[in-house]
Amino acid sequence: MLKEEMFYTKKLRWSFWPSSRWARGFLFILLTLLFLSLFFYTMQKGTSRELIRVMTQQSFPFEAIILEGIPGYSLPEREHLNQVRAQGVSLGTFLLTGVNIADARTYFLSYFTPPPDGPAWIGWAYNPGDPEYEGEIPELEEIPLNPSQGEEGVEKPALPLDDEVLVGIYHTHNAESYAGDGGGERDKGGNGEIMGVGDTLKESLESNGIRAVQALDAHELDDFNKAYSKSVYTATALVRNYPSIKLLLDVHRDGLLGVNKSTVMVEGKEVGRVMIVIGQKNPHWKENEALAEELMAFAEARYPGLFIPKITYASDARYNQHLLDGAILLEIGSQLNTFGEAKGTAEVLGDLLAEWIKKT
């Protein structure tokens, strides 16, 4: 009887996992090991290692991908996880094919004509220790108090001295534009639509009784990758000229791969959403973060959904935020939004910032 039970148990075990499954299982394990071996080899020997290192330096949330599906994690973080997944897939697809899956225009080869030196953000891979090419922080005495000319003699409006200005606005990437209504994503001449968004923000602030100034300096005419090494002079001049400034805003539009057009209805009007970016290389970034979180909470109570609820962090960039605890980088919409949607955001944002400043 005992022998029969042992034989029956042994037979069940083999019938549960027949020899064909053993073969498939062995092959699957072998392929998995081969894949992992090749993956680690490319990380050590090829550009994959550099890419992962760059993504880590840019605070790419790998944990959000690893923890996908874990009970208690996915549901409350769903929007963030969906964004991370989309960006990850878009990045991989873009590297392999040159197609940004979030932008249907890039599906056509006639549209995608990369610049000779490759996409601008590829510059990270060549300078991972200083991905934004910010360089050293210039000494204050190197900053003109009231510069009236840009590089190569390009005229720019002088900044009038004023001790009542509370908001300073400038644009590190001054050529950025909005393609949602059929236009281009950038203006190589340096006067992109983002400058108009900044002007609208300034006018909205001033209509609400808050003095503001906008610097019109061009920082990327010669080299997009080195824009921050130039805008630091503009930002420093703003702080020096206007010691009363409470907010120093570097106004951009988002353009990261995988970012889709995003809007929100505010008082019956469709406007682009706002994202805040904090550079953690700034030794006082926690103070900038605290101010940003306070502003986002105020905005959520006033205009729900206007701000993307997650701050984006860059571990190896400072974005000129070392100059002031109230220095933050704003991304108003993305390249897929329309200029009108972005200007609508700037109008609402001006009202919001004015109200917030008066209460603080």
Image: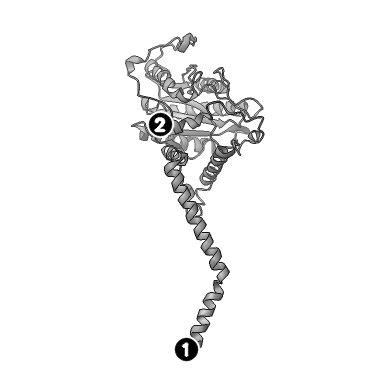
Residue 39: percent from left, percent from top: 47, 48
Q: Position of residue 277 (x, y in %)?
A: 46, 33
Work out whether mark 2 precedes mark 1 in sequence or the reverse, and give the earlier one: 1
Task: Look at mark 2 in the image and give the residue it sits on.
Answer: 317
Residue at 51% from the left image edge and 83% from the top image edge: 7
Q: Classify residue 256 as left or right of residue 160.
A: right
Relative depth, front residue between 233 and 120:
120
Query: At 64% across and 25% down in the image, what residue appears?
Result: 183
Residue 343 screen position, x and y as percent: 58, 25
Q: Residue flagged by tag 2: what amino acid is it? A: Ala
Q: Residue at x 43, y 18 (%)?
A: 234
Q: Closest to the observer: 191 or 227?
A: 227
Q: Residues within 10 Å of mark 2 (few under 14, many from 20)?
A: many
Q: Position of residue 14 (x, y in %)?
A: 53, 75
Question: Which sits in the foreground, 304 or 5?
Answer: 5
Query: Is residue 332 visible from the viewing direction of this image?
Result: yes
Q: Is the C terminus in the top left, top right, bottom left or bottom right quadrant?
A: top left
Quick check: marks 2 and 1 in contact, CB under 8 Å? Answer: no
**Circle 1 sits on which residue?**
2
Mark sitting on residue 198: none
Dot 1 falls on a residue whose secondary structure is: helix
Alpha-carbon neighbours of circle 1 within 10 Å: few (<14), some, or many (≥20)? few
